[in-house]
Amino acid sequence: MIGTIRKHSKWLWWIIAALTVVSFLYWGVAPSARNGGIGGNGDYGMLYGHKITQQDYINARNEFRLFYWVRNNEWPDRNPNIKDKDMEEQIYLRLMLTKKAESLGIYVTDEAAAAAAGEMLRSIGRNGQSVPIDTFVKQVLTPEGLTADDFERFASHDVVIQQLIQTLGLSGAFVTPQEAAATYQREHQEISAQIVFFSASNYLSQVTVTPDAVAQFYTNYLAQYRLPDRVQVSYVEFNLTNFLAESKTEWSKTNFEDNVNATLERLGMGDFPDAKTPDEAKAKIRDLLIRQRAMADARAQANDFATAVFNVNPLQADNLVTVAKLKGLTVHTTAPFASLYGPEEFSAPEAFTKSAFALTSDDPLAGPILGPTSAYVIALARQLPSEIPSLDQIHDRVTQDFRMVQATMIAQRAGTNFAPALANQLMAGHTFAAACIDAGLQPETLPPFSLSTQTLPELGNRAGLPQVKEATFSTPSGRAGGFEATEDGGFIAYVKSRLPLDQTAMSTDLPQFTAGLRRARESEVFNQWVQAEANRQLRTTPVYNLQAAGGAN
């Protein structure tokens, strides 16, 4: 479980984030999942010595759906990056947090819970006006099988969890002004540095390529050239762009502008950050509504086609082509692809790849498979087992790899040999730039940067910023660091000086920086507690058993 929690640390940040709500997201669970869950056999495990009831699980599930929705403006089943197992983990984590708070006697008054709920409703209103609870229930909760009681319980538990965070993370919040100032200085003081790269591409001309050398390289790296299990499928795609014209026509028969205005009134400008005016937001809404209807039409036609394909006896892959010809539809065939990457011809939804690898000769058809802009019906074309291509088949690729590996080694030798010579020249009074130029190298001056710098475009793909930071901030001013190897070859960095800190900026930024530092320390302490607590308390739950069985892979 601890590995899973660390892997999904971003999800934990959702739990430990401040209660302030910035926007709504839709998080829905497919109807088939609403009454199920991984405790569908009636065993939901235990927490703190008490059995988890089905109602406990349902409440936590509904709360987490609301939690996600109010922070992301969508329901989880609309987000293709969220897996069922991810949701289950978060449901159980929320259960654990609420039960822990209960065991510690943490509670909130009805007034505090009502205030939290009111703040959430104000956050989705316009011009600071709260959305009426009746409107919220009718338009948001009821369509998802949720009630006002679910929302009130969610708001109450959210405040309880925040109090739990403050209680358990309290030790991390003790940051003195002196410590905050020192941390600010350390993270924001900039340095002036120069750098010289030893890139493999500059040493390719020094590589000697012979048939024997390439053959030996291929033999040494056979495992690198192994192709995984692959599959090739035929498919018919129903893209929403083919239904846009019909969608516009259908919308023209309705009070389309009333729908647009009502949508903007409900969502507000905040849901359209790229729109500068209400008219621009309405244009985006029109496009969204047209595309949604077009996608619904595409899915309906895909469903009709799939039904026809599956109704042909006997059930076989050729049925896809047969029915497609009768309906005048185009059949495409992918190149062989692996489960890790999916088809190379287009960006397929994860469900497409998963369904393709589930196909067999006895069960060769699947669909409709829904993606963001298309629906697919697929048929098995062929399955290709893992294999290692012969050298003749991939000779050019092997040769190119051989040249790059050799060039990288030459570049790294050059950098390693230059480092002591550079140190001697610097001690003799030569400048970094002069020493590099004398050696036939091209020095570069980097713009000032600090530990808080997030990007440094001048590095390109030649080195990672964290590695450059580590090399420079551990080097005294007026000195060059040692040679740092990279995948591309390597670099040597020279620290010219440490620049004076902008005291005016520090005075302005320090209060907010200190508050952020305290929150970060508090969150770090709480995060560590959650990891340890989950490993102890969730061992009897289905979600832990799923992880132990390898269900997270």
Image (cartoon, helix red, strand yellow):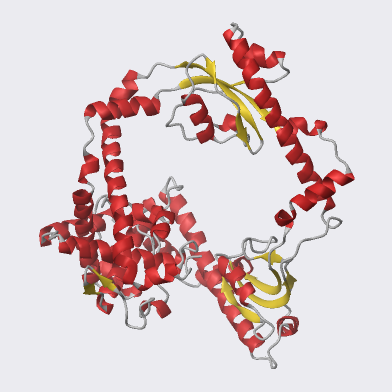
Residue 29 position within the rendered picture, expressed as x and y whole percent measured from the top left: 40, 72
| Residue 354 relative to residue 274: left or right | right
Q: Position of residue 439 (x, y in %)?
A: 71, 16
Q: Is residue 180 above or below residue 331?
A: above
Number of callouts in the render?
Answer: 0
| Residue 55: percent from left, percent from top | 25, 77
Q: Residue at x 71, y 36 (%)?
A: 408
Res. 156 image quadrant: bottom left
Q: Relative to the observer, which residue lies in front, 165 or 114?
A: 165
Occupied quadrant, residue 33: bottom left
In the image, 396 versus 296, the foreground residue is 396
Which of 444 and 48 lies nearest the eye of the viewer? 48
290 left or right, relative to 42: right
What is the quadrant of residue 239 in the picture? bottom right
In the orientation shown, which residue stands out farthest toward the right?
211
Q: Is residue 472 left or right of residue 187?
A: right
User: Residue 231's spot in the image, x, y percent?
Assistant: 70, 70
The N terminus sits in image quarter:
bottom left
Residue 366 shows in the view: yes
The reply to whether residue 65 is visible in this rendering is no
The residue at 50%/25% (across/down) is 472
Q: Is residue 88 above or below residue 193?
A: below
Instruction: Compare residues 103 and 304 and report the one nearer the observer.
Output: 103
Q: In the image as oriented, which residue stretches furthest toward the bottom?
A: 313
In the figure, is residue 434 to the left or right of 128?
A: right
